[in-house]
Amino acid sequence: MGHQGAVWACNLDAHATKAATGAADFTAKIWDTSSGQELLSITEDHIVRCLDLSKTDSGAHLLTANNLKKIRVYDLAVPTSHIRVCYSADGLCPYIERIKSTQIAHFTSIPISLWDFSDRFRRPVVNASVWSKHTDKPILDMQFLHPKESKALSEVLVAYVYGSSIHLAVFDWRRPDAPISTGDSESGRTFNLPCNLSSVSLHPTEDQLICGGEDHYIYRVDRTTGEILETCKSHFGPVHCVRYAPDGRVFASGSEDGTVRLWQNQVGETYGLWQLSTPNQTEDLLHTSTNQAAATAAVPIPSAQ
């Protein structure tokens, strides 16, 4: 059961019924999240560094990227061979995201590239890169979100971290010739945090994001202003991964200290593992009696005349 080497990547499908893992044993595996059973194992020609399950068809397609700079797409109904493959001349691909029929990938040698699949059902040839962005430091993580204020379903907000910076930009994947919104504008900003960062996650419904890095902290940030709303400290090592739950009420963090921790976005809610205790009737009576006794003792009793 399980991989025979270090696990480099793990992702869920949109309904969290399937999980995909990639590892140093040259395999990508699909798991049933309710039973923990392995459903499928795919062998590649090198370490599987990152992968993702498609989000619009119940995880019917799997994307992988390995140390040979190969990005593959598999139809899990016929997983014996990939339905397409593309190569990165720029470097290793540590992250992949599926947005409908478009694949987003970025590479540790600094450029980010947007790749378009014209028709995933007819074994298409992968088109050339339609968007590229360069930074002065390696990009360690990125997240995608459809902005709630957007009128076009094809517009996507991307957040990525490099060094101590978080950059936000909006692009329209149906209009690759359109300029990408970047810089200090309403739809593109760069924020600097107190440490070098490893991971970022966008809140699904609110204008917030979380990030973590070398100083062991998780920062909750207003993504419109860059203001740090909250600093969370519990880890005893660098934070390598942070992610919001789909409803945004909880986020998780993983650290070099060997722990995964869960945090409430709004502290004090009764939610999931956080069940606020309600005093029972006996406790209420004792509490009331104690208060009354204290009040009585504090009130001087007038002498009888």
Image (cartoon, helix red, strand yellow):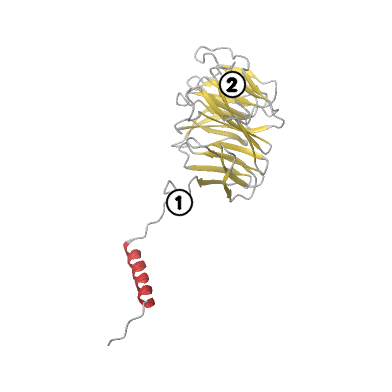
Amino acid at dot 1? Gly
The residue at 36%/80% (across/down) is 300
Q: CA distance from mark 2 to mark 1?
A: 44 Å
Q: Residue furthest right?
A: 136
Relative to residue 32, is residue 218 drawn left or right?
A: right
- Helix, strand, or loop for circle 1? loop
Percent of width and height locating residue 223: 56, 37
Left or right of residue 124: residue 300:
left
Query: In which quadrant of the rendered view does residue 52 lie?
Result: top right
Residue that numbered label 1 is attached to:
268
Residue 85 vertical position relative to residue 303 in the rendered view, above or below: above
Within-10-Å neighbours for mark 2: few <14, some 14–19, many 20+ = some
View extreme (front): residue: 305
Quadrant occupied by the C terminus: bottom left
Q: Amino acid at mark 2?
A: Arg
Residue 79 lies, in percent from the top left, at 52, 21
Q: Position of residue 186 (x, y in %)?
A: 57, 30
Of labels 2 and 1, earlier in sequence is: 2
User: Hey, which residue is sitting farthest bottom in the picture?
Assistant: 305
For label 2, the residue is 72
Whether residue 291 is situated above or below residue 215 in the rendered picture: below
Is residue 133 among the parts visible in the rendering?
A: yes
